[in-house]
Amino acid sequence: MNENRRSILEMLASGKITADEADRLIAALDRGQPAGAGVETSEARPKPKYLRVVVDTMEGHAGEAPTKVNVRVPMQLLRAGVRLTSLIPALARDHINNAMREQGVNFDIAQLKPENLEELIDQLHDLTVDVDQKDTQVRVFCE
Amino acid sequence: MIPSLAIVRIRPRQGRGFRLWIPLALLWIVLLPFAVLALPFFALYCAIGRINLGSALWTIAKIAGGLKGMHVDLEDARHSVSLHIA
């Protein structure tokens, strides 16, 4: 039992408030603090639906108005994009893997599965990438 | 669910712009015969590349479906262009 609830019950016991008033106060307390409030779990948070990329330039060329880009990509499209690796023929996949290995990336592209992306998307809630340059600002985040 | 409508808005900085409502449902119908014609070639590509045809078609369908909700805004000194797929 938390402190607020205890004090409401004490006020009721000492006759300072009526049973109806206590009931209303407890109900208001419950509305203000739903069960599990304060403990934010990943299950309670909705999954992000879109990946947003926002690019703002502070000033355009020759003093013109700035250029702005705002792209919203559905996560469904990213999920489907990962499946595209299954459309790469085995021979081409080997070439890709070899090229990546030569660049120091030891990764098998055939191992890239939609499940991997799900794990990544689950963690994207807390991610915001800000790139600030002298006259350009780039933001990448999920919503 | 595949997208059924694309809205393109082009607006100059000064003056009136215009908005195009493109019914993608009609576009899919127009493209369907071409897709049917291309299917044997695609099946051949899948056979040569040892790719599961069903899985490949499912992926393409998922990509088409995933486009729904896509939104792009581009604004420069002269124009503002916006594309929304619904």
Image (cartoon, rainbow, N blue to C red):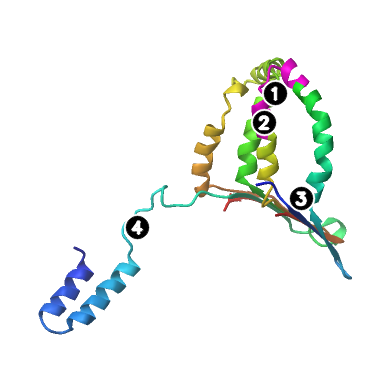
Q: Which residue is mark 4?
A: A38
Circle 3 SS class: helix
Q: Nearer the viewer, mark 3 or mark 4?
A: 3
Q: Quadrant of residue B57?
A: top right
Bounds of the magenta segment = B44-59
Q: Residue A142, percent across and down?
A: 58, 50
Q: Which residue is mark 2?
A: A84
Cα–Cα gap, marks 4 and 1: 46 Å
Q: Is residue A129 left or right of residue A32?
A: right
- Quadrant of the drawing holding the N terminus of chain A: bottom left
Indicate whether A26 appears above or below A108. below
Cα–Cα gap, marks 3 and 1: 29 Å
Q: Residue at x 38, y 49 (%)?
A: A41
Q: Which residue is mark 1?
A: A88
Q: Which residue is mark 3?
A: B25
Cα–Cα gap, marks 3 and 2: 24 Å
